[in-house]
Image (tube, helix red, strand yellow):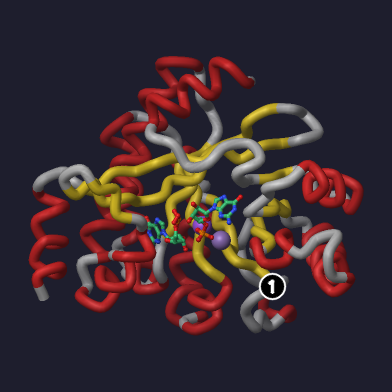
């Protein structure tokens, strides 16, 4: 309960911040976007999302927090556009209860309009489990987002129970291979079988495929050999505050 009231105040007090993890195209050797991840700067402690996102979802605080994250991502996209010509997208994680809101598209429109960036500056990630759990309630938003140019990525792909038939009808742009499969690449034959299947599925459906949780050169090489050149993970960079990501870009890209 104490944590709940502290979390209430955290948003008002600007204690919620976004860190950014670069998405890399290994073949082109360039950054192709970034994922925004929330942290709670509580005094000297940086609280990881695992310790407050579940509570935020239970209490409904996730709604204003996510609305703030969308606005903050649009603001950051504009700043980076001015600073170094950033023209890719920033991915924001949304729970399905946000997708169920009929005003999600309007809210995103307001965020990008406020900072004068295109709709494609914002990408949305929804986990496969959340998507499938609420599919019927979420589909109308997916279509409207797609129409205005906001791309959808399916997070933690391979861990849920997607109806593959449905997948062909959904206006999604990207699947993100879950890190558990990436972790076991080169260790268990099942993981490379799953990764191979996801890459083939994505290719057949015309979707981009990105691997998350890439930590080793070996994993990078296997993924590249299997035909996945988009990657994200500690091998390249952990999620960083904006100024640190700017330094990383200056040194790396
Ligand atoms: O950043 P990582 O370190 O700890 O994130 C842990 C989990 O929290 C991940 O599953 C991630 O998707 C989730 N998460 C991080 N930021 C957000 C956010 O802004 N919104 C939602 N809904 N989940 C988030
Ligand atoms: O899928 P999700 O949105 O939960 O992914 C974001 C989470 O993954 C964050 O907690 C982030 O810190 C974490 N993460 C990012 N890169 C790596 C990595 O290379 N290895 C591991 N184990 N976690 C990572
Ligand atoms: Na994510
Ligand atoms: Mn994920």
Q: Position of residue 164 (x, y in %)?
A: 73, 79
**Residue 151 visible, this orientation:** yes
Q: Nearer the viewer, residue 182 or 14?
A: 182
The kind of secondary structure element at disc 1 is: loop
The image quarter containing residue 99 is: bottom left
Quadrant showing the N terminus:
bottom left
User: Above or below — where is 151 with respect to 134?
Assistant: above
Residue in the image at 29% along x and 54% along y = 47
Residue in the image at 67% along x and 79% along y = 166
Q: Seen in the image, is 194 located left or right of residue 9?
A: right
Which residue is disc 1 drawn over?
Answer: 158
**Residue 120 visible, this orientation:** no
Does the Cβ of the disc 1 residue fall within 8 Å of ligand 4? no
Q: Position of residue 157 (x, y in %)?
A: 65, 68
Q: How many marks?
A: 1
Q: Position of residue 110 (x, y in %)?
A: 28, 44
Residue in the image at 43% along x and 27% along y = 244
Q: In the image as oriented, which residue stretches furthest toward the front?
A: 44
Q: Seen in the image, is 132 located left or right of residue 182?
A: left
The image quarter containing residue 207 is: bottom right
Q: Nearer the viewer, residue 191 or 120?
A: 191
């Amino acid at each position: 309960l104490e944590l709940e009231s502290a979390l209430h105040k955290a948003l008002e007090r600007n204690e919620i911040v976004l860190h950014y993890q670069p998405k890399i195209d290994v073949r082109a050797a360039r950054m192709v976007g970034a994922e925004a991840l929330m942290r709670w700067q509580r005094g000297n402690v940086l609280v990881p999302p695992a310790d407050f996102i579940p509570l935020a979802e239970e209490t409904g605080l996730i709604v204003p927090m996510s609305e703030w994250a969308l606005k903050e991502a649009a603001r950051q996209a504009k700043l980076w556009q001015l600073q170094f010509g950033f023209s890719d997208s920033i991915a924001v994680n949304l729970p399905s209860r946000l997708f169920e809101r009929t005003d999600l598209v309007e809210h995103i429109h307001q965020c990008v309009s406020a900072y004068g960036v295109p709709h494609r500056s914002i990408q949305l990630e929804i986990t496969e489990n959340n998507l499938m759990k609420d599919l019927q309630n979420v589909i109308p938003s997916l279509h409207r987002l797609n129409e205005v140019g906001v791309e959808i990525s399916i997070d933690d792909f391979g861990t849920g129970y997607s109806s593959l038939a449905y997948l062909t009808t959904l206006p999604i742009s990207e699947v993100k291979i879950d890190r558990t499969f990436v972790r076991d690449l080169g260790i268990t034959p099942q993981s490379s079988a799953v990764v191979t299947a996801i890459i083939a599925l994505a290719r057949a459906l015309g979707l981009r495929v990105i691997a998350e949780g890439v930590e080793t050169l070996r994993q990078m090489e296997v993924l590249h050999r299997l035909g996945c050149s988009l990657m994200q993970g500690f091998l390249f960079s952990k999620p960083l505050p904006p100024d640190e990501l700017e330094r990383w870009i200056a040194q790396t890209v």
